[in-house]
Amino acid sequence: MLTKTKIWLSSPHMGGTEQTFVNEAFETNWIAPLGPNVNGFEKDLKQYLGDDNHVAALTSGTAAIHMALMLLNVKQGDEVLCQSFTFSASANPIVYQGATPVFIDSESDTWNMSPDLLEIAIKDRIAKYKKPKAIIAVHLYGMPYKAKEINAIAKQYDIPVIEDSAEALGSTYFGQKCGALSDLGIISFNGNKIITTSGGGVLVTKNLKLKEKAVFLATQARDDAPHYEHSSVGYNYRMSNVLAGIGRGQMEVIDDRVQARRRNFDFYKSHLAQHKEITFLEEPEGFYSNRWITCIETPSFEYREAIRLALQEEDIESRPLWKPMHLQPVFKEHPSFTDGTSEHLFDKGLCLPSGSNLTEDDLNRVLDTITNTLKS
Ligand SMILES: *Cc1c(COP(=O)(O)O)cnc(C)c1O
């Protein structure tokens, strides 16, 4: 009997040389949160993002956001402005610091932080004597946010921007790599991201002193002494040398992975073009998305659910778009500045299987299931 295998939303895709770097770690006994692979992976990323960047390899993208907030001295009682339409890991570290997230809705051109709502929020908080300590903007699904507008507002009010590029390695904004567009950036290498170390992340900064401080805090904040001496609270956030080996192998294939994800997008878009009810997020002029996940917008919640359930029936994973943070039970008491954009996307949008390892047969299976639903 022919059994169909499950099609995943986004699964790990090894390039081939990862294991060589991992074996090297074993052979040299660098089984620790430091070593040649950690240095090598940081160097690969520095080269990729641009030589004016400094990179600190950490245990996760979440740890990198937490570290960025600590470097900006975000403390108990502070407020941090955060894109509402995102994964919860963008906002959770604000709470780790005892600070309060204030959520900002998206605009429809990129699905990311609305510059208009951002400015309204900043003015409101300043009028209430609560000037925000930082802004967390997100390149969601790999689509860059409007960095010129966001950065200009941030500069006008002198508030630093943390660039959550967890989903956007390989995306560019007017030719500049995402992850390196602002004061502090972060990238994730979780198992579902465009490349992976199974779990991991990096902090990206133009300031070498900040990188050094991040590494210091991430390795238990040990002062320079023969014994263990501590004058600040430390964290165990450094990336393992074994996992960094996977990252070095993955960096060899990053360009192929971006091309494959963009091909998935083009495939879905070209074959679904005749169905006017299904729409796709286009790249504004100067924006280049890695198309980490291909998302569609449908006319209604019911319409979206019909497609999702038909795919599920065929053992194909799909998922509604991120549920906005201002609607999440854990965050809904916090202030928010919204206009319905992300709520509408959450209602009607769907993420389609988008892995770089999908075969032609896989893609056709997804497409056939969707087109059958549209006919019935
Ligand atoms: C994955 C992700 C994170 C967190 O990264 P981890 O490495 O999984 O901790 C943060 N923000 C966004 C937008 C993400 O998609």
Image (cartoon, rainbow, N blue to C red):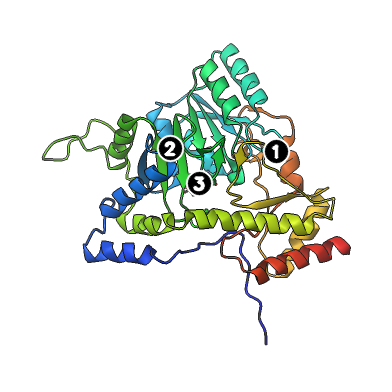
Binning the other alpha carbons within 10 Å of mark 3 as few (below 14), some (14 to 19) or many (20 upward) gives many
Kindly identify the residue that appears in the image at 17 percent across and 40 percent down: 228
Percent coordinates x, y for residue 14 in the rendering: 46, 64
Q: Quadrant of the C terminus?
A: bottom right
Q: Secondary structure at mark 2?
A: helix
Q: Give the camera-side residue of 58 and 79.
A: 58
Residue matched to label 2 = 66
Percent coordinates x, y for residue 6 in the rendering: 63, 70
Residue at the extreme bottom: 1
Above or below: residue 186 compared with residue 239: above
Residue 28 location, quadrant: bottom left
Instruction: Measure the alpha-carbon separation of dots 1 and 2.
Output: 24 Å
Q: Of callouts 2 and 3, which one flags the residue occurring earlier in the amino acid sequence? A: 2
Can I make out residue 326 in this image? yes
Kindly identify the residue that appears in the image at 79 percent across and 49 percent down: 298
Q: Secondary structure at mark 3?
A: loop
Left or right: residue 305 versus residue 90 is right
Above or below: residue 114 compared with residue 328: above
Q: Give the camera-side residue of 5 and 155.
A: 155
Can I make out residue 192 in this image? no
Q: Quadrant of the N terminus?
A: bottom right
- Three-letter residue code for mark 3: Leu
Left or right: residue 247 versus residue 321 is left
Left or right: residue 28 versus residue 293 is left
* Labels 3 and 1 touching (C-beta < 8 A): no
Q: Secondary structure at mark 1?
A: helix
Residue matched to label 3 = 169
Check mark 2 vs ligand 1: CB closer than 8 Å? yes or no. no
